Amino acid sequence: MRERITSAIEGFADSGRGDVRRLQGTRERIYRLRVGQWRIFFSLEARLMVLVLRALPRSGAY
């Protein structure tokens, strides 16, 4: 699963594509990337870096 998550993050960083949504109800711009049953929460730093905040299974993500 680690390889799949890493690949999805790198794919988003390279192309901007993926199942990504901006989280609502937060002051910061935090995004969610869906990878199977996992949710990767991240922010974009200066449009050059994806800063991963958490990686959780869907059941514990929200």
Image (spheres, rainbow, N blue to C red):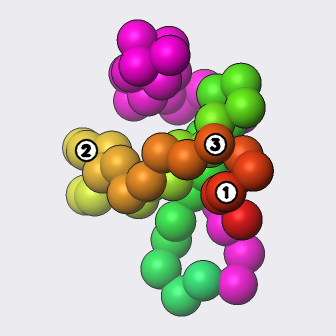
Q: Nearer the viewer, mark 3 or mark 2?
A: 3
The quarter of the displayed image where residue 48 is located: top left
Contact? badges 1 and 3 (CB < 8 Å)? yes
Q: Nearer the viewer, mark 1 or mark 2?
A: 1
Residue found at x 25% / y 44%: 49
Q: Which residues are magenta?
A: 1-25
Q: Name the spot of residue 29 as percent of width and height, x first.
A: 50, 71
Mark 3 and mark 2 lie on one chain; the one further toward the N terminus is: 2
Residue identified by numbered label 1: 60
Residue sitting nearer the eye, 9 or 15: 9
Residue identified by numbered label 3: 57
Q: Amino acid at mark 2?
A: Met
Marker disc for residue 19 = none
Q: Amino acid at mark 3?
A: Pro
Q: Name the spot of residue 31 as percent of width and height, x first.
A: 57, 57
> CA separation, marks 1 and 3?
6 Å
Mark 1 and mark 2 lie on one chain; the one further toward the N terminus is: 2
Q: Is residue 5 inside the magenta stretch?
A: yes
Residue 3 in sight here: yes
Quarter of the image that includes the C terminus: bottom right
Q: Amino acid at mark 1?
A: Gly
Graded by Cα atoms within 10 Å as few (under 14), some (14 to 19) or many (20 or more), the crowding at tag 1 reads few
Residue identified by numbered label 2: 49
Contact? badges 3 and 2 (CB < 8 Å)? no
> CA separation, marks 1 and 2?
26 Å
Residue found at x 71% / y 24%: 36
Graded by Cα atoms within 10 Å as few (under 14), some (14 to 19) or many (20 or more), the crowding at tag 2 reads few
Graded by Cα atoms within 10 Å as few (under 14), some (14 to 19) or many (20 or more), the crowding at tag 3 reads some
Q: Is residue 9 inside the magenta stretch?
A: yes
Indicate the secondary structure of the residue bearing disc 1.
helix
